[in-house]
Image (cartoon, helix red, strand yellow):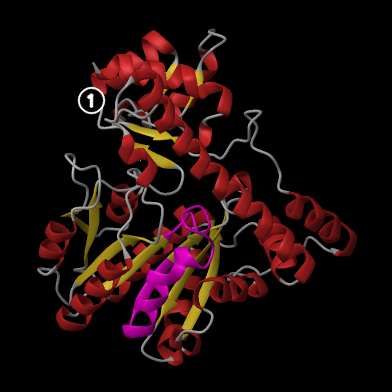
């Protein structure tokens, strides 16, 4: 049976982690895998999460199954976090999933059942999992223009021109904030224009918001999504608690469907539960229990929001400090665009050969497409990383 299987293709990001761990150099820097690290290079458990764990341990009396939809209080909390105050609140349903990747697959499977000929449009470039997950669900994938390699910003005109050709059998997948891998975000006026195109042409928007709170702030990062939810009949959303709650290994996410009315949203939820039954059956509970506990307690919510704000402010500081080091010590403004990017990631504009040079000569690990994780930097790394980037750029 297995003799016919081809050799596996290594995951471009996970394989970097293995190579980094096996690298014996003391001054190596991991800017590959997308996790937040503090100044000590650790991915800490947030204080709000630690306190919520104490509450969960004290009050949880059973490990019985929660149900196909997961924790419904968590599901409502995710709806509130993203859609509070919008018209979509009266026509929405949510299902807890094993991370946002699980949500992507569930909504991909839902699209395949509801409209088998669906084409999903994704940005060029996009999150490495978007294309394979949609294709694994049996959907066609098409790219729309997004990132300008010259300006290192969103090419809004080309993006809107491409999306003007999307129609009723199409789904347009957007990054809610903190675009992965580029860090270049569309502005609010672009959200408005894409919403208008959806209304005119009939395509369904699909927003993947995995980094809420890491860009301009918790509320600000959801403004474009909320405007769109207020003004379209149908919409799909995936969200993750990996980054903004630091629950990476707990695999805590949600798939959200906005329908033309509540009955349609409920029908979509029912179909997702059927699809979940044939795959993972039920999502893990612990992460959802922690998030629910935090968001249902005013004190814990305030603690969490303060911690999240501090993380977001530190990301801004890391970007500014790296750019200042490049400008002041190495006399180059070539990388000033890094300050304008949002969230964890930035694309340097380096070739695969240059990224290999960073790794082999300096022990700095980034993804082959030029992506580096700003959240993987510590303040002490910045002079060395700036020196290496400047040397490789010449």
Judged left or right of residue 380, residue 300 is: right
Where's the N terminus, which quadrant? top left
**Magenta residues, as a range?**
209-237
Q: How crowded is mark 1: few (under 14 residues within 10 Å), some or many (20 or more)?
A: few
Residue at image coords 51%, 52%: 214
In the image, residue 218 lies in the stretch drawn in magenta:
yes
Residue at image coords 59%, 62%: 282
The residue beneath circle 1 is 351
Q: Position of residue 294 (x, y in %)?
A: 73, 64
**Can see residue 218?**
yes
In the image, residue 345 lies in the stretch drawn in magenta:
no
165 or 117, which lies in front? 165
Q: Where is residue 43 in the image (x, y as percent from the top left)?
A: 64, 37
User: Please, is residue 330 above or below residue 275 in the view?
Assistant: above
Q: Element type at marker 1? A: loop
User: Please, is residue 303 above or below residue 15 in the view?
Assistant: below
Q: Where is residue 84 in the image (x, y as percent from the top left)?
A: 54, 80
56 or 383, which lies in front? 383
Where's the C terminus, which quadrant? top left
User: Please, is residue 222 above or below residue 132 in the view?
Assistant: below
Residue 325 image-quadrant placement: top left
Judged left or right of residue 215, residue 180 is: left
**Can see residue 61?**
no
User: Please, is residue 305 above or below residue 325 in the view?
Assistant: below
280 or 286, which lies in front? 286
């Amino acid at each position: 049976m297995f003799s016919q299987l081809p050799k596996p293709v290594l995951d471009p990001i996970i394989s970097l982690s293995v190579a980094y761990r096996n690298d014996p150099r003391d001054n190596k820097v991991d800017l590959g895998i997308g996790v937040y690290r503090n100044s000590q290079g650790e991915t800490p458990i947030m204080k709000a999460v630690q306190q919520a764990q104490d509450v969960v341990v004290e009050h949880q009396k059973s490990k019985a199954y929660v149900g196909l939809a997961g924790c419904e209080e968590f599901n409502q909390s995710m709806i509130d976090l993203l859609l509070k105050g919008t018209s979509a609140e009266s026509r929405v349903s949510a299902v807890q999933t094993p991370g946002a990747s699980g949500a992507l697959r569930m909504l991909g499977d839902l699209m395949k059942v509801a409209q088998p000929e669906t084409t999903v449009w994704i940005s060029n470039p996009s999150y490495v999992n978007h294309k394979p997950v949609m294709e694994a669900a049996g959907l066609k994938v098409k790219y729309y223009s997004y990132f300008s390699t010259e300006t290192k910003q969103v090419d809004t005109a080309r993006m809107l021109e491409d999306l003007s050709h999307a129609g009723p059998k199409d789904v347009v997948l957007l990054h809610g904030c903190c675009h992965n891998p580029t860090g270049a975000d569309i502005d609010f006026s672009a959200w408005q224009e894409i919403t208008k195109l959806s209304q005119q042409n009939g395509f369904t928007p699909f927003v993947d918001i995995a980094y809420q709170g890491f860009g301009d702030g918790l509320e600000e990062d959801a403004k474009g999504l909320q405007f769109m939810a207020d003004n379209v009949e149908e919409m799909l959303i995936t969200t993750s608690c990996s980054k903004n709650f630091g629950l990476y290994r707990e695999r805590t996410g949600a798939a959200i469907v906005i329908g033309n009315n509540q009955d349609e949203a409920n029908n979509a939820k029912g179909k997702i539960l059927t699809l979940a039954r044939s795959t993972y059956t039920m999502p893990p509970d612990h992460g959802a229990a922690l998030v629910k506990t935090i968001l249902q307690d005013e004190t814990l919510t305030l603690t969490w929001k303060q911690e999240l704000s501090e993380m977001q402010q530190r990301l801004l500081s890391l970007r500014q400090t790296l750019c200042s080091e490049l400008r002041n010590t190495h006399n180059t403004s070539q990388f000033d665009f890094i300050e304008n990017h949002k969230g964890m990631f930035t694309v340097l504009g380096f070739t695969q050969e240059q990224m290999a040079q960073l790794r082999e000569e300096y022990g700095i690990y980034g993804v082959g497409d030029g992506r580096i994780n700003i959240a993987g930097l510590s303040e002490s790394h910045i002079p060395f990383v700036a020196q290496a980037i400047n040397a490789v750029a010449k």
